[in-house]
């Protein structure tokens, strides 16, 4: 089984490859068709890569069964970044949280999600140095999720309410949030969004 999930402007593709139903490894396909398995972080059992920038920085997810107590284990999910030299690092999160990194821009800023120990879900932007900024949902909503980030630091994703309502949103570089609204002819309590320049 192999899945391609991201590509950069130089034609480098990243994704996952492994036996069907078994452990998968994050991989990189170069334009000449060669494939390289990306190293697992210490303690991880499998990984998947989701995005790559022109510098060759790759982001994704690594998973592991972590010891909780005695023989009890819990699945851990780590947001990870592979550097161009092949080294891999876990992006910092609060203690007990799980995370995933979905996208990276040309400046090394990463967009992803964190689920805290108490179950709270938040979109996150990591700086190239690893500083974490949580991106809050719309007022009254309970969760936020990031999907992608552009080279100006804008993050696209969604904000979710307790009743299951999900709204498309855009986070600005300063952390402020804009609701993107819905297609005309649908009932909504969100006013039409002004033109966006991002």
Image (cartoon, rainbow, N blue to C red):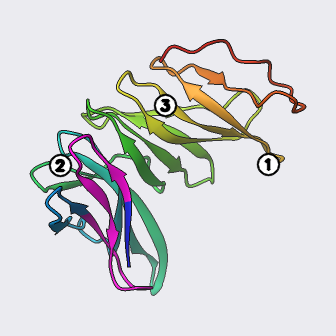
Q: Which of the 4 image quarters holds residue 45?
A: bottom left
- Residue behind mark 1: 164
> Which comes before the other along the chain, label 3 or label 2?
2
Assign a secondary structure to mark 3. strand
- Residue behind mark 2: 83
Q: How far apart are marks 2 and 1 (CA)?
A: 37 Å
Q: Distance between the residues labelled 1 and 3?
A: 22 Å
Number of marks in picture: 3
In the image, residue 96 above or below residue 144? below
> Which comes before the other along the chain, label 2 or label 1?
2
Locate the N terminus by quadrant.
Answer: bottom left
Disc 3 crowd, CA 10 A, few/some/many (<14, 14-19, 20+): many
Residue in the image at 62% along x and 47% along y: 120
In the image, which disc is placed on residue 26?
none
Residue lying farthest left?
A: 85
Q: Which of the 4 image quarters holds residue 33?
A: bottom left
Magenta highlight on residue 32: no
Residue stretch in magenta: 5-27
Residue in the image at 40% along x and 73% along y: 66
């Amino acid at each position: 089984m192999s899945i391609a999930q991201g590509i950069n402007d130089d034609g480098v593709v990243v994704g996952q490859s492994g036996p069907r139903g078994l452990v998968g490894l994050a991989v990189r396909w170069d334009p000449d068709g060669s494939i390289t398995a990306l190293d697992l972080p210490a303690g991880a059992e499998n990984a998947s890569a989701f995005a790559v920038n022109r510098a060759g920085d790759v982001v994704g997810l690594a998973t592991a069964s972590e010891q909780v107590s005695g023989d009890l284990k819990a699945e851990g999910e780590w947001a990870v970044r592979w550097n161009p030299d092949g080294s891999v690092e876990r992006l910092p999160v609060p203690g007990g949280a799980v995370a995933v990194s979905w996208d990276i821009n040309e400046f090394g800023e990463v967009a992803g999600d964190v689920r805290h120990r108490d179950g709270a879900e938040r979109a996150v932007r990591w700086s190239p140095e690893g500083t974490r900024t949580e991106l809050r949902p719309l007022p009254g909503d309970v969760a936020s999720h990031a999907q992608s980030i552009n080279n100006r630091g804008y993050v696209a994703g969604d904000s979710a309410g307790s009743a299951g309502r999900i709204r498309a949103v855009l986070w600005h570089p300063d952390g402020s949030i804009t609701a993107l609204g819905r297609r005309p002819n649908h009932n909504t309590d969100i006013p039409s969004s002004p033109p966006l320049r991002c």
